[in-house]
Image (cartoon, grey):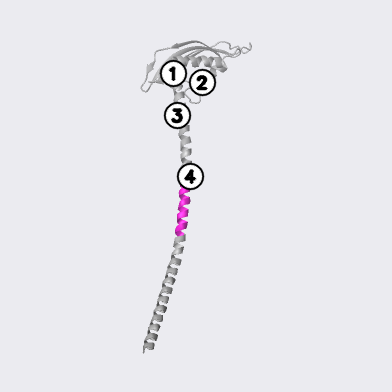
Amino acid sequence: MKDATYQLEERRQQMYIRTYAVLCFLFIALMGFYSYSKWGDYQMALQGVEQNKLYISSLTNSVTSEKAVADVKKDESSQLNKDIAQKLKVIFPAADDYTNLTKQMDAYEVQLSTKSSPFEVSNIDYQDPVKADTYSILPMRMNIRSSKENFQKFLHMVENSGSLKENKRLMDISSIRLNFENNDQNTGASEIISFSVQINAYFQK
């Protein structure tokens, strides 16, 4: 009777062991299947993280590069503004500044005048400034003796005054009176023009 009971108990234990083994196998199999099914998602997530890192790195480099370019342009713009402000002091000064205007005319006379092609300023007469709505005018009259070529250069200079490229005081001609001295083509002498010109030089109000 004891042997039968012992054998029954032994079979029951073996059945428990087999059942436990089957359950363990099923658990391991389920865990393996679950891990395998999630492994692809994990790999995709890793790839996404790496791509995001590369994208962030690219954006960082792009921002750094753009900032460097912006800093250079800012410096260039600042320098350009300084250059323009400096030129405007000459082209459109804050006051009548007739002293520098006289120096400008003297320098222009030296630049143009030669023995064969004269340009001689004999007189500069500054008149009282006139105030307009948004600017002021410094009228002046000049008496000049010049060759025909230099006369044309003078008109061209006044026409282009006020240009940032030329960097000359903004002016225009309100009237001009001419007198031709050497008009005889047979003498071979250069044609000389004596003229009196009324000029308006502009400055800030």
Q: Which residues are magenta?
A: 44-59
Query: In the drawing, what numbered circle is on residue 61?
Result: 4
The residue identified by callout 1 is 201
Q: Amino acid at mark 4?
A: Asn
**Earlier sequence position, callout 4 versus callout 3:** 4
What's the CA distance linking mark 4 and mark 3? 30 Å
Q: Position of residue 115 (x, y in %)?
A: 60, 12
Q: Give me the C-alpha separation between circle 4 and circle 2.
A: 51 Å
- What's the amino acid at mark 1? Ala
Give yes or no for contact between labels 3 and 1 (Cβ–Cβ under 8 Å): no
Q: Position of residue 160 (x, y in %)?
A: 49, 23
C-alpha gap between disc 1 and disc 2: 13 Å
Which label belongs to residue 25? Answer: none
Name which residue type carries label 2: Met
SS for dot 2: helix
Residue 92, quarter of the rendered image: top left
Q: What residue is drawn where x is 45% and y is 49%?
A: 56
Residue 62 image point, x, y percent: 47, 44
Mark 1, secondary structure of its residue: strand
- N-terminal-most mark, 4 or 2: 4
State which tag comes first along the sequence, 3 or 1: 3
Distance between the alpha carbons at the discs numbered 4 and 1: 53 Å
